[in-house]
Amino acid sequence: MIKTCGWMAASGVLLASAAFAQDEDQPRFTMETVFELEVASDPQISPDGNTVVYVRRAMDIEKDRLTSALWLYDLEGDEHRPLLSGDSMGSSPRWSPDGSRIAFLSSREGGKPDLKVHILEDDRTYSVAKLQEGASTPVWSPEGDRIAFSMLVPDGPQQLITLPKKPEGAEWADPIEVYTDLTFRADGMGYLTPGERHLFVVPLDGGTPKQVSQLEGGAYGPVWLDEDTLLGIGNADEERDLQPQIARLYAFELEGGEAEALTGTNGAVGSAAVTPRGRIAYTFTPDGDENYQQTELYVMGADGSNRTNLTEEYDRSVGSVVPQRNGFLALADDRGITRLIRIKEDGDIETLTDEVGNEGMGRPYSSGSYSVSNEGTVAFTHRKTNRPADLAVMKRGNVEVLTRLNEDALGGLAMPTMEKVSVPSSVGDYEIDAWIALPPGFEADGSYPLLLEIHGGPHTMYGDFWSTEIQRYAAEGYVTVWTNPRGSTGYGAEFAQEIDLAYPGKDYDDLISVVDHLIEEDYVSKDRLFVTGGSGGGVLTAWIVGNTDRFAAAASIKPVINWTSEVLSADLSAYGAFEWLKEMPWENQELYWSLSPLSKVGNVTTPTMLMAGTEDWRTPKWEAEQFYTALKLQGVDTMMIHVPGASHYIANRPSQLLAKTEAIMAWFERYDPEAEDGE
């Protein structure tokens, strides 16, 4: 439990050792610096623990893309080199059981993905299968002679009508497109090719992949139960489109036959793994009454019997589970950090390291990945607030950071000082964690502008992680704060469930409490308050300006403005209707409207910018456009920015990331009372 007495004073903890008084002549983090950044992700350690292959991602200024290349780190010889040459993109590397080969996915820009294998002994790479559709992460069979993956199996075109034959040379319009699925488009994918994902197996020496699953509704997440059986996740119910929180674990015989369901229909299996003793471990999120439920770790027999919940008493969600001889390793978010934990068979839990770093480049969300050798050496992404994730290993409890990918770009810069505070909310008995980036040379004299950055989700977690966006704001002189208001993960189920059918709500009070604390501590000026956030943070930004005029300006990025239009047009309609709001908009329009920021727009006087991607299907651009139009109609200063071709991940390309941060700051500067050209 994290409830505390309301009288508890807010505490501050210095997270970085940099002094406040830094050399004003030292260069800062500029727009150009963004293109020099790199980040380590998906580290995979060899079975013998001597070599790590990982994905090294970098910003390409010429192609304006986040590129990915596979690199090898030899732990014995301290050699660090690319696995491949050329301009192909590598991802999802996985070692063969004997450590002699690495399977991975490879593609060139605009090309079809290949499933490839690299032989380390003779440094040779060959293509196992050229796939027509995107494949999932490759999974080696226990003997290392086959590879499993999942892939889309397209349906044939749906024929509704037959038009007359087109005359030779005639120029007709494109034919009509017919959709019958509830989800006919998805964020980041656009309009979907009708079909289902299924499990496939291909021999190591190549050939035509064999489809293993025939389950109605498809299957994904392959895991080898043994040499003859694959596990996979799916939902074969006739009403599966209306069951967003149901996913069952099935067993599929490679030689055919009916799929065997190993779990029930009371929740969603997230992933599965097989223990050294042949039992099945899987993560499971129950389909409960509240819209947030903890993800727990279960183990059961290979036939689905003797099911046990190992994390029933652990009030955190777990993921990325790896079975060990003495229990399980897993990741768990906890109060702004990601922990690598060991879960024992008796349910006892211990933290192995709290230094797991996020793999993102944009905002300070929790994430991270790791792998384990046969003898227990762990390779993982390493956290440092003022650096993107590096590669690290942990052996017998000792952590060694192997790379310094960004020292050339960031080593000579004046970086912000980071602090953490825990502030009692003005409503209820919760303490709200927040992190502050103080600009170089900061002095607490009450003069600085505040930039409040609100996370999305809303069931996600910010923390002590790298953020390119935060770095830009702080470099330009903003005291930048990011928080975990109620509804955030990492603080237990009760804290996350506080916003069930009440979002936005008391999370607003949590955010304002943090702002008030920074004003009281003379960190910022009460006349220079600015607020922004994306997705769920965009919702709260719009809600804030509908409830107070304290902020000089606001920027609501990719928000939900009207829950009715969101549920009826976004790519998560079933989740919105059945899980989030629990009723259809025509059944309880009062609820939908009361939680929509559009209901508050008549109160807004704060200059508010809106931004959305033109191909965002999670919170489509017309959500932002509704708020923009309403503000224009009532004479409030506003601006609408479209990001061409951008999905919900609006900052997917480096130039888009910069366009986002610089547009936000340019808008704020217009209304900063202390800015030279402020209005």
Image (cartoon, rainbow, N blue to C red):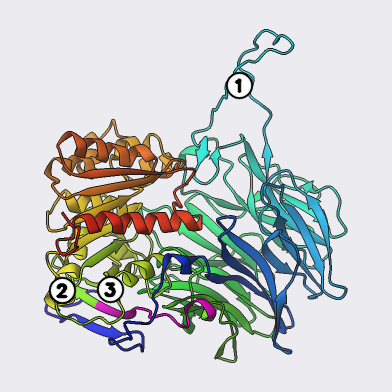
- Position above or below: 315 against 209: below
Task: Give x and y (percent) for residue 129.
Answer: 80, 52
- Which residue range is magenta in the image? 408-421
Query: Residue 167: x percent and y percent?
Result: 71, 9
x 67%, y 36%: residue: 154
Residue at mark 2 to residue at mark 3: CA–CA distance = 23 Å
The amino acid at mark 3 is Asp
Does residue 388 sit above or below 674 in this rendering? below
* Quarter occupied by residue 312: bottom left
Tell me the distance, in whole angstroms, between the alpha carbons under discs 3 and 1.
53 Å
Which residue position is annotated with label 1?
Answer: 174
> Is any atom of residue 344 visible in this view?
no
Amino acid carrying label 2: it is Ser
Residue at 24% from the left image edge and 57% from the top image edge: 668
Residue identifier under label 3: 433
Which residue in the structure is indicated by mark 2?
447
Residue sitting nearer the eye, 475 or 450: 475
Dot 3 crowding, Cα within 10 Å, few <14, some 14–19, many 20+: many
In the image, is 383 to the left or to the right of 219? left
30 lies left or right of 581: right
412 in magenta: yes
The label shown at residue 354 is none
